[in-house]
Image (cartoon, grey):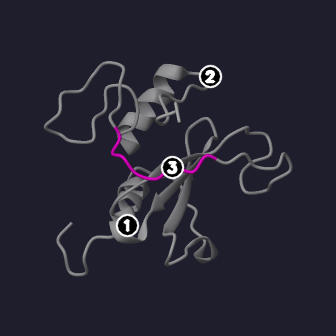
C-alpha cells in the first residue's frame, strides 16, 4: 500500500499564529514540537509517537461534534489525568462522559481550542500510569 500514514493536517484559522501557539503551549502539538525532549525541535515538523490512528468520515448530521465544524481532532495521550489537571489549571474547559470510556478502547475527554474546534483526548488502556506511580 503506498500510503504510510498522515503527513500533515492543515486547516484554516482566524489567527493561525495564536492558534498554533495555543496548541504548542497546552498540548505540545504543532510545528517545532517534539515528543522526546532530547530531540531538537524542527521549525516545521512535529514528531509524534507511532500508534493507532482512526480515519473515519462521519455522517453530515452526526451530533458527535458541532454541526458547524467539518472536523474534530483526536489526540492519543498518556496520563490523561495529569493532562486534564494541567488544562484545568490553565482555565480550559473539559468535557467528560463515562459513556465515552470503554476498558477495551480507552478513556476520553474533550476540550475546544480558542476557535471552537473540538479536540478529543484519548488514553489507550495500556497507556495509563501504574497505580501508585509518581507523576
Residue 98 lies in the magenta stretch = no
Which residue is label 3 attached to?
53
Please state the total of marks drawn on the protein image: 3
Picture coordinates of residue 108, whole percent (x, y): 52, 64
* Crowd band around label 3 with a 10 angstrom C-alpha radius: few (<14), some (14–19), many (20+): few
The picture quadrant where one finds residue 133 is: bottom left
Mark 2 or 1: in front is: 1
Percent x, y for residue 95? 58, 62
Q: Earlier in the sequence, mark 2 or mark 3?
A: 2
Q: Is residue 54 magenta?
A: yes
Q: Disc 2 versus disc 3: distance between alpha carbons?
A: 27 Å
Q: Residue at x 52, y 33 (%)?
A: 3
Say what secondary structure mark 3 lies in.
loop
Residue at 79% from the left image edge and 40% from the top image edge: 68
Q: Which residues make up the magenta segment?
A: 48-55
Whether 76 is drawn above or below 37: the answer is: below
Q: Quadrant of residue 63?
A: bottom right
Q: Secondary structure at mark 2?
A: loop
Q: Secondary structure at mark 1?
A: helix
Whether pointer 3 and pointer 1 mark residues with C-beta atoms closer than 8 Å, the reply is no
Q: Is residue 114 above or below residue 106?
A: above
CB within 8 Å, label 2 to label 1: no
Residue 71: x %, y % from top left: 67, 40
Real-space Cα distance between discs 2 and 1? Answer: 31 Å
Q: Nearer the viewer, mark 2 or mark 3?
A: 3
Tell me the residue that label 1 is attached to.
Answer: 81
Q: Of the residues under marks 3 and 1, which one precedes in the sequence?
A: 3
For mark 2, what is the residue?
A: 14
For the C terminus, the quadrant is bottom left
Most distant residue in the left direction: 38
Amino acid at each position: 500500500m503506498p500510503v504510510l500514514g498522515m503527513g500533515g493536517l492543515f486547516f484554516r484559522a482566524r489567527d493561525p499564529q495564536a492558534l498554533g501557539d495555543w496548541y504548542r503551549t497546552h498540548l505540545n502539538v504543532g510545528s517545532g514540537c517534539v515528543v522526546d525532549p532530547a530531540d531538537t525541535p524542527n521549525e516545521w515538523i512535529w514528531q509524534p509517537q507511532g500508534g493507532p490512528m482512526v480515519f473515519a468520515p462521519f455522517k453530515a448530521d452526526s451530533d458527535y461534534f458541532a454541526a458547524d465544524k467539518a472536523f474534530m481532532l483526536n489526540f492519543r495521550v498518556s496520563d490523561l489525568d495529569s493532562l486534564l489537571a494541567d488544562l484545568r489549571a490553565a482555565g480550559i474547559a473539559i468535557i467528560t462522559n463515562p459513556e465515552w470510556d470503554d476498558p477495551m478502547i480507552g478513556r476520553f475527554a474533550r476540550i475546544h481550542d480558542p476557535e471552537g474546534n473540538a479536540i478529543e483526548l484519548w488514553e489507550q488502556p495500556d497507556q495509563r500510569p501504574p497505580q501508585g506511580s509518581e507523576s
